Image: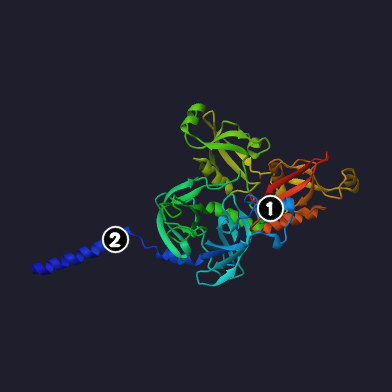
Amino acid sequence: MKRKHVFLWFIVLFVCVFAETSAQGFPDFSSAVEKASGAVVHVKTKAEAPQQDLFGGFGFDDPFFQYFFGQPREQQKRRQSRPVLASGSGVIVSSDGYIATNNHVVEAAEEIEVVLNDKRTFPARIIGRDPNTDLALLKIDADALPAIVFGSSDELKVGEWVLAIGNPFNLTSTVTAGIVSSKARNINILSGDMKIESFIQTDAAVNPGNSGGALVNTRGELVGINTAIATQTGSYAGYSFAIPTTIVRKVIDDLKQYGTVQRAVLGVTISDISDTLAKEKKLQVMEGAYVHSVAQDGAAAAAGIKEGDVITGIDGRSVGSVSELQEQIATHAPGDKVNISVLRSNKPISMDIELKNLHGNVDVLTTGTLDQLGASLEELSEKEAWTLKLSGGVRVAKVKKGGRFEKAGIREGFVIRRINNASVQHVDDVKKEVERLAVSSADNALFISGTYPDGRQAYYAVDMGQ
C-alpha cells in the first residue's frame, strides 16, 4: 500500500476514535430535555405597586393607615397605582392542571397567567402557599397535560449531571446543564421560625425567571425546583440552588389536599456542631445536630431527648447537619412515628418518637379554618357584653402554646371587636376573614383590635404567612 494511502487511513481512524471519545466525554441531554421540557411552564404575574404617598412613606392603602383612619374615598388618594408585571417558571405536577412553583413568584400577584410549552395560555389560581419552604401550588383548568415524572433527590450524588429548565429573562424553554456541587445547603434566604432550607447546589446557570422551574436528572426526572442564586450582581455568578423533591412532593401534596402544610416538628432548638462547640461540650463528633433546648410539650421531650444530645440519624439514615435533619423531618406529617439516633455523653442510643405539629398535637390543620389561629373562640353572652359595656364581640377563651395568637401577644380573655377594619360580632365573622385571607395572594396578616375585661384597648397584627 502506498504511503499516501496509509496516511489517509490513519487520519480516518484518528477522526473516528476522537469522535467516539468526544461523544463519551460530553453526554447528550436531548432525551432528558424532550421528556421534561413540556412540563415546564411560564408563570406571568400582575400586581399593583402604589407610588409612595405622603405621611412619611405610609400610603393610604397601607393596612396600618386604614386600621386607624379607615378606607379613604378614591378621590382622596394622592397617588395612583400602577401595574407591575413579573414572571417566573412552574412545573406541571399532574395532568389535570396542578403546577408547582416558588412562593416568591406568586405571593404578591393579583393576577396569574400560565403559558404552556405549546404556547396555550390559561389563568391560574393559587391553591396554597408555603413561605417556610418557598413553594406554592397553582391550578389551571386544563386536562391531559404533560406532567413531570418525579425522581429521587435523595439518590442524587455530588458530581452528577443535572439540567435546569425555565424561562430566564423571559427566554422561554431555556435549558442549561451543570453538576450537583453540594447537597443540604442552607443559605439563609428564607425568614420565619419554621423555615426549611436544604437546597441542592448546582453550577447549572440559573437567572431571574428560572425561579419555580425544573431541575431534572439525565433521565428527565424532576429532582428539584430551582429557587435561588448566589450572586452579587443579581444575575448568575456560578451557583444556583433548588428545593429537593423530598420536600417538594410533601409540600405540594399537603397544599393540594389541605390547603396548608401539615408540618411535623420535633420540639427542639438545635444547631450545627462547630469546632468551638465540640470543644466546649466535649463532643467527639463534628456531624449531627446539637440539641440546645427541648420544648416541654413537644415530641422530643415525650420521647426522652435531652439538652446536650446530638441527633445523628433518623430511621437509619445519617444526619450530618441541621439542614439534613430539617429535610428528613419535612417529609413526615404529625402523627408519624420515627426512630431517632442520638449521642448522649458520646454514647449512641436510639428512641422512637411520635412527631407533633406546632401546637403540640397531631390534629390535621386546614387552610381558612380557625385551627390556624391557635386559639379557641367564644361569642359573648348578652350578660358579658352588658358587663363589659360592649355591643358584642368574640372572646379568646384559650390560647394554644406556640400558636399564631400567642406569637402575636394575644392573651386569654381578649375580646375581638374588629379584624382588618371589619366589625366582629360572631365567631363566623372571624372565620370569614380567615377564609378570605386564605385565598388572597396579596395579604398575609390579620389586624385585630379589641379590649380586655379590665377595659384596656389592644391592637395586634397576626402573621398568617408563616
Q: In which quarter of the image is the N terminus?
A: bottom left
Left or right of residue 127: residue 412: right
Real-space Cα distance between discs 1 and 2? 61 Å
| Residue at horizontal 48 percent and vertical 46 percent from the top | 185
Residue 201 sits above or below residue 120 on the image: above
Q: Mark 2 points at which residue?
A: 22
Q: Which residue lies furthest to the left in this view?
A: 2
- The residue tagged 1 is 63
Which residue shows up at 58% across the image and 48% down it?
Answer: 330
- The image position of residue 350, as x and y in percent, is 57, 36
Percent x, y for residue 222?
49, 58
Secondary structure, mark 1, is helix
Confirm whether residue 129 shows in the render.
yes
Is residue 18 shown left or right of residue 55? left
The residue depicted at 61 percent of the width and 33 percent of the height is 293
Is 348 or 371 nearer to us in this picture? 371
Of residues 191 and 355, which is closer to you in this image?
191
- Disc 1 packing (10 Å; few <14; some 14–19; many ≥20): some
Q: Nearer the N terminus, badge 1 or badge 2? A: 2
Closer to the observer: label 1 or label 2? 1
Residue 461: give x, y in percent of width and height: 70, 47
What number is the disc on residue 112?
none
Q: Residue at x 65, y 54 (%)?
A: 59
| Nearer to us in this view, 265 or 121 | 121
Instruction: Say if mark 1 contacts mark 2, CB within 8 Å.
Output: no
**Mark 2: secondary structure:** helix
Task: Identify residue type, mark 1.
Answer: Pro
Q: Where is residue 300 in the image (x, y as percent from the top left)?
A: 63, 37
Does residue 371 appear anywhere in the picture?
Answer: no
Q: In this view, does 103 lie above or below 265?
A: below
What amino acid is labelled 2 in the image?
Ser
